Image (cartoon, rainbow, N blue to C red):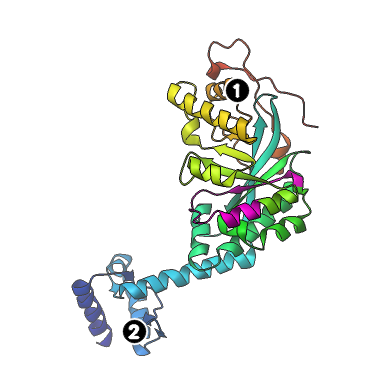
Amino acid sequence: MLESRALRFLLIVGLINGVVCTVAPSIVLLRPGGAEEPIGRLVLVLAMAAVALTPMQAAALWVVVSPRVRALLASRTTRRLVEQILREETIDTAFQPIIDVQLGRVVGAEALSRFTTEPARPPDVWFAAAESVGRGLDLEEVALRRALTRAFRLPHGCYVAVNASPSMLISSRLLPLLQASGFPLDRIVVEVTEHTSIPDYAPVRAAREQLRAHGIRLAVDDAGAGYASLQHVLALAPDMIKIDRSLISGVDADPVRGSMVAAVVMFALQSGAALVAEGVETAAELDALRTLAVDHAQGYLIARPSTDPADWANWRAPTAPARARNADQAVYVIPPTIT
C-alpha cells in the first residue's frame, strides 16, 4: 500500500540521516531553502497513518529535515509565541519590597515581569526569545507599561524600580513611556540589567543624564555578577548600586564577603550612590548588612515577589532582633504602617 511504502521510506531515511522531528496528525514538509510546500497526497497519507498508529508506534515515526529547516521551524514558533504575547499582553507584574535597613521601613519595590503565556517559561527566556526575533524592545515596552500601571497600587510613597536593557535605555522610547505612565517620575528607578555587555558607554551616560533631568534615577542591577564589574559601575556612575545575591549569601559568616561588601559601601559613600543588597534570606545576613551600614535590602526574608495587591498592602520590614540567642531565632518587631 502507498501508506506502508511512504512510512518505510521515511523510516529508512531517518535511520540514515538522523531524526529531528516527530510526525503529527497534520504535516507540512519544508524544502531546505525554507519555502513551505504541502506535498499533496503524502500529507494526507501520513496524517491518516499517524492517527492509525498506536502511541508507541507514532513515537517511533520521524520526519527528516535539515538543520537549516529545523532552525527555521524554531524561529517561526518563537515568533508566533512572541507575537501572541505582544498582541494579548499576557504579562503580569510581581512586586518585591525594598526596605531601609537602618530605619526598618519599606521604601520601594522592584517590578518583576511574570508571563502567563503557555508554555510556561521564565521571564528571561521570553525576553531573549523576543530579542531573537527582533521584538525585544516591543516586549520590554509592554512589560514596563504594565508595571507602571500596577505601581499605582503600591503603598503610599514607595518608589518603583523597573528593569530595562541597555538597548531600551538608549532608545527614544523609554522617557516618553515613563512620562506617559503618569507615575511620579521622581519615584521611578530604572535598573540597567547586567546580562548584556555595553560596548559604548557614551550613549548610556547621555541617557542617564536625560533621565536625571526629569528626576528619574538609574541603578546598576546585580553588581558583582555578570558584566557588573567595577569598571562597569565606574563607567555608568549610577544613583543606586544593587549588590548581587552572590556577595550577600553568608555575609554574616564569611569575612571575605563582609570585606567586599564593606568596600562597596565605602565606594557608594564616596560616589554618592545608594546601596541595595539583593537576595537577603536570613536574619543573620540582615544584621550583618545593618552593621556594615548598607542602605537598603530586599529578599525572601522580607517578602517574596507577589502579584497580589493585598500582599503589597501588608508589607512590613523586620527590625533588629531583641536579645535573641542567634539571629535566626529572632522575633521581629513590626513597625507602624507606612504613611
**Quick check: can you spot residue 116?**
no
| Mark before the other along the chain sequence, 1 or 2 | 2
Query: Could you say which quadrant of the image residue 4 lies in?
Result: bottom left
Give the percent coordinates (x, y) of residue 202: 58, 55
Q: CA distance from mark 1 to mark 2?
A: 71 Å
Q: Amino acid at mark 2?
A: Val
Nearer the camera: disc 1 or disc 2:
1
Is 26 rendered above or below residue 206?
Answer: below
Residue drawn at 67 percent across, 28 percent down? 317
Is 301 rendered above or below residue 194?
Answer: above
Which residue is more in the foreground, 143 or 228? 228
Which residue is more in the foreground, 291 or 10? 291
User: Which of the labelled discs sits on residue 71, or is there none?
Assistant: none
Residue drawn at 64 percent across, 20 percent down? 332
Examine the structure image and report whether residue 321 is included in the region drawn in magenta. no
Q: Amino acid at mark 1?
A: Arg
Give the percent coordinates (x, y) of residue 52: 34, 75
Examine the structure image and report whether residue 191 is included in the region drawn in magenta. yes
**Few, some or many residues within 10 Å of mark 2 (<14, 14–19, 20+):** some
Residue located beneath label 2 in the image: 45
Is 305 rendered above or below residue 207?
Answer: above
Residue located beneath label 1 in the image: 290
Q: Residue lying at the far bottom in this picture: please name it.
A: 40
Q: Secondary structure at mark 2?
A: helix
Give the percent coordinates (x, y) of residue 308: 68, 44
**Few, some or many residues within 10 Å of mark 1 (<14, 14–19, 20+):** some
Is 222 rendered above or below residue 286?
Answer: below
Which residue is more in the foreground, 26 or 159? 159
Q: Is residue 50 left or right of residue 142?
A: left
Q: Secondary structure at mark 1?
A: helix
**Quick check: can you spot residue 335?**
yes
Task: Write down the region rendered in magenta.
Answer: 186-208
